[in-house]
Every structure is written in C-alpha cells, then in structure tokens.
Amino acid sequence: MRESDEKLAERLADAAGELLLHLRAEGRHAGKALGQAGDAAANALLCRELRAARPDDAILSEEEKDSEARLAASRVWIVDPLDGTREYGEGRSDWAVHVALAVDGEAKIGAVALPGLGVTLTSGSPPALKPANAPLKMLVSRTRPAAEALFVAERLRAELLAMGSAGAKAMAVVRGEADIYLHSGGQYEWDNCAPVAVAEAAGLHASRADGTPLRYNAHDTYLPDLLICRKELAGEVLRIAAGFAASS
C-alpha cells in the first residue's frame, strides 16, 4: 500500500532531523561549518527519498539547484533541509526541518520537525489550539526584529518573544506558546510552505502581511512577508500593519 503524502512528509522530516542531531553530536564540525554540513546532508537525504517515493513530482529545495520544469508541475515538494542554520550551529533548539507539498500553488501538506525539542508537527494531525495568552505574545527574530512587528506589538500591548528559525516561530504559535508571528524581513517559499500548511490545518490564519493569500511554486520563489496568528486576531493585526505601511 502506498504511503500517504502526510506520512511521507512526516517520516522524511523526522529522518532529516535525526540525521542532523547525529551530525551535531559527532562533534566533527562546529558553528558555520556545522550548519553547512547539516544543510548538505539533510538535503541529500530529503531529495533522494522524495525522488524515490514520488518520481513524478517536482522538488523545490533551498539547497538544490532550481529548475523551471517545476513550473509545469501540479505537485511540488518544497523543502528546507535546515531552517535556522545559525541556531543549529550554535547548539540551540530553535531550528527546524520543513517538508511540504504544494498542489496547484497551495500549501496542502506539511511537516515541521523541531529535532532539538523532540517534536514534529504535521498538517495530518495538528494539535488542538490552546487558549490565547494574556498578555498576547508575539514572535520576532532574535537577530533582526522587523520594525513592522515591533509597531504591531506595541499597539496590541503584546509581549515580544525572540526566536530563531521561521519554522520554530510558526510552530510556537501552533503550540500555543505565542499568538502572532508577523514577518516582513524577507523569506522564500521553503521558509514558510510547510509551516503554513501545519498552521492552517491547526485552524490558524496564514497570509501575506497585507492579507493576500500565500501562493507557491512561483517563478520567483521570494516571499517577503508572512502572518501566522490566531484567527480572531488577524483582522486587527492586518489593520495595524496596514497603518504602519501607510506611514512608512
């Protein structure tokens, strides 16, 4: 019996996460060199397994040379073998592995492994949403918090939480550790396709920072902004973000 797309995404995210943990534990590399080695090893595993399991599907990976042939494909696996390379190299836990399947431009299936926490979240079995935090908690980059996010947080009187990778931040909202993740500092499709699939399956709002839908398998893979938040907060966050854009 053929393995479902959901199970395949979860299995490969787990496998890449285990490989990355093993590589780090070996101690042969450190810092930036460890991140580079991890990227290469996890990418090789994911692409090899996807080609074996789904030979008719296209692949878009941060670490693989892109091909315009994918633009004609309905089903495209979009992967980030190591999201949060810096955090991984520093021995932190806020890094992730993303495995997603976009179908006709929409993020349909996703698995986000958080190997440093021993957790993998999937669109096939998302956790039940917890009650909102009081005060609200909003995620920002630990190295370059976006001015737009700081503007929104101030007006919502939200507490700021600094964290590493996009996947780790998005999953913190899914897990109820935070309520809002607004990013405007630039991302690519592989940075958020899997997190968006998991977030939407969990019942969260996911869109561009101006509220427009997120689309995948585009010719230009750059996706500069992202909002993942509780649905009841989306309207207010988008209104405040629009005010920031108008005043900038």
Image (cartoon, helix red, strand yellow):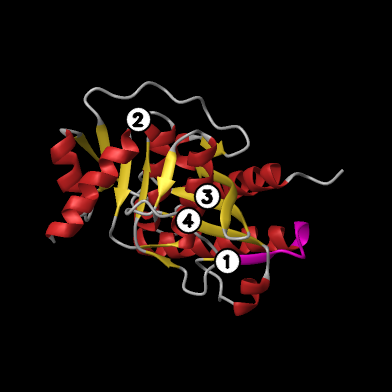
Q: Check if mark 3's residue and mark 4's residue have beta carbons within 8 Å.
A: no
| Residue under label 3 | 194
Mark seen at residue 177: 2
- Range drawn in magenta: 52-60
| Residue under label 4 | 82
Query: Distance of mark 2 from mark 4, alpha carbons?
Result: 22 Å
Query: Of label 1 and label 2, which has the lower sequence position?
Result: 1
Q: Quadrant of residue 162?
A: top left
Count residues near mark 3 (Cα–Cα under 10 Å), then give few for <14, some for 14-19, many for 20+.
many
Query: Of label 3 and label 2, which has the lower sequence position?
Result: 2
Count residues near mark 4 (Cα–Cα under 10 Å), then give few for <14, some for 14-19, many for 20+.
many
Query: Of label 1 and label 4, which has the lower sequence position?
Result: 1
Give the residue displayed 42% in from the left and 60% down from the top.
Answer: 35
Query: Of label 3 and label 4, which has the lower sequence position?
Result: 4
Helix, strand or loop at mark 2 = loop
| Residue under label 1 | 60
Helix, strand or loop at mark 1 = strand
Helix, strand or loop at mark 4 = strand
Query: Distance of mark 3 from mark 4, alpha carbons?
Result: 12 Å
Q: Which is nearer the eye, 184 or 10?
A: 184
Query: Distance of mark 1 from mark 4, alpha carbons?
Result: 14 Å
Query: Of label 3 and label 1, which has the lower sequence position?
Result: 1
Query: Distance of mark 1 from mark 2, alpha carbons?
Result: 30 Å
Identified by mark 1, the residue type is: Leu
Total marks in image: 4
Give the residue displayed 61% in from the left and 64% down from the top.
Answer: 44
Query: Distance of mark 3 from mark 1, alpha carbons?
Result: 12 Å
Give the residue displayed 50% in from the left and 66% down from the top.
Answer: 62
Q: Quadrant of the C terminus?
A: bottom left
Query: Distance of mark 3 from mark 2, alpha carbons?
Result: 19 Å
